[in-house]
Amino acid sequence: MKILTAKQIYEADKFTIKKQGIRSDELMERAAIGIFDWIHSRLQGANVNIQLFCGIGNNGGDGIALARHLKENDYSIQVHVVNYSEKRSKDFLLNLERLKDRKIWPNFIKEKSALPNISPDDIVVDAIFGIGLNRAPHFWVSKLIEHINVSSAFVLSVDIPSGLPCHRIPWDTENVIRANYVLSFQVPKLVFFLPETGIYQNQWEILDIGLDPEYLDATATDYELIGKNEVLPMYKQRTKFSHKGTYGHAVIIGGGYGKIGAVQLASNACLSTGCGLVSAFVPECGYHSLQTAVPEIMVLTDDDDENISAIDLSFTPNVIGVGMGMGTKEITQKAFEFFLRKNTAPLVIDADGLNILAKQPSLLKYLPKNSVLTPHPKELERLIGEWSDDFDKLEKAKIFSTENDCIIVIKGAHSIIIHKDKGFVNTTGNPGMATAGSGDVLTGMITGLIAQGYTPLNAAIFGVYLHGLAGDIGVTSKGYESLKASGIIENIGKAYIEILKSPEDVPIRKET
């Protein structure tokens, strides 16, 4: 699913209005009816007080039109117009007149107005500001937003939480509605998925308001949301007359004294994702533990008992995953440099492999094209430098990816795969995956996919989705606190099965 910018959404509105031969207020009516249907399907006429806070732009117009439908269906409502400007959109004014025609008189809130009482049992519909917000709300509007936030009422935001700009972090963290639910028109917004801005809504859902598919299909976007529909076409089905060699030979390089477990997790994940053959290259101290823990893999050892001191492979594998548990001692840095200079296999680089690159950026020129880098936040910072906010982080990651012709997996609640100027936002995963070894598992999974013939970009996108889905399945029996990295591996097979279920067997994921 494409993630459009505010400008593209406005263009989609105009395109739809022109192509479908409708008026702008008719498109607004579609939005209002969609919100009403969502509310009505859940409340079924329940005796609950609904307070609507409407701005004086098109987002407010959506709220005013919604109020009409709620009243016509006998819901108890209070309508508040947040009068923050003398300018009003024409469709807001049109719907305000329609509301008054039905003898519904809004309460106009101005700078010196008393704030209305909000009961914890009320439902608040937030339609104050939309995606066009380009400056901080007035001080008194901020006070209203704070008043709503502390009310303990259920808050439903129209399209986007009020006060949250569409393409930057908020001017003030207290100036933003904290929504229990957001009904986003047609497409999600990038701010839903970033750590600094995603905190302003608990859940979100798309409402289809009939924006013309021709525009949506033809428009290129900087970001895409990755769900089942996006990864399923990437899936490579196995053939009957295949053998282990068909699915590639991967090598996992890493480990050190006391950190062989990282290689065990990555190797096991690589196999469990479908790689035909996996060899692990570790210091000699890891030989017996790996042979015992993962009997399906082959083990190669360094002459050094505790560190990676020289990476010497007598064959060229289909792909190499490197860095986990490896350390950054000088002897290991030299071994890694020598390895990069002569290596020709595709690479997935994690952990200390990334830390060595950050220490010696001159080594970046030796990375094969489309190498996949899987940093956690601190490793990412070492690579691309400090960032001022999440949007700056994404831009720096894009520049780094373009300059070094690589793919970056920015790990987080919504991991984002960056390839040059394009970002792919993942929808699977949960807080239970914030556990030691989870990143090693991801590296092994992406490595295993590349071994099977997936392109590095598709392997990163598919691997991140599959990794998160395995974690989602794991927490259903383990809970957030007890999920371990090995538990993610145990559920990779179930994740594959879930992806391959027919659409009618798969419940629609409404919250990400």
Image (tube, rainbow, N blue to C red):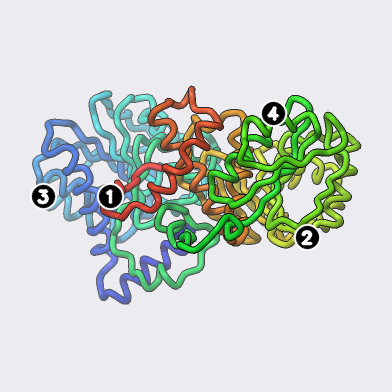
As shown in the figure, which amino acid type bears the numbered disc 2? Answer: Thr
Quadrant for the C terminus, please: top left
Q: Which residue is mark 2?
A: 344
Q: Which residue is mark 3?
A: 102
As shown in the figure, which amino acid type bears the numbered disc 4? Answer: Ser
Question: Who's the residue at 69% across and 55% down the image?
Answer: 319
The answer to which of marks 2 and 3 sits earlier in the sequence is 3
As shown in the figure, which amino acid type bears the numbered disc 1? Answer: Asp
Q: Are marks 2 and 3 in contact (CB under 8 Å)?
A: no
Q: Which SS class for mark 1?
A: helix
Q: Which SS class for mark 2?
A: loop
Answer above or below: position of 4 versus 307.
below
Q: Is residue 181 left or right of residue 309?
A: left
Q: Are marks 1 and 3 in contact (CB under 8 Å)?
A: no
Image position, residue 146 (x, y; %): 42, 29
The answer to which of marks 1 and 2 sits earlier in the sequence is 2
Q: Look at the image and tell me whether residue 458 can be seen.
A: yes
Quarter of the rendering containing residue 114: top left
Quadrant for the N terminus, please: bottom left
Q: Which residue is mark 1?
A: 505
Q: Which residue is mark 4?
A: 289
Q: Which of these two is toward me, 442 or 175?
A: 442
Q: Find residue 446 and name its label.
A: none
CA distance for labels 2 and 4: 29 Å
Quarter of the rendering containing residue 2: bottom left
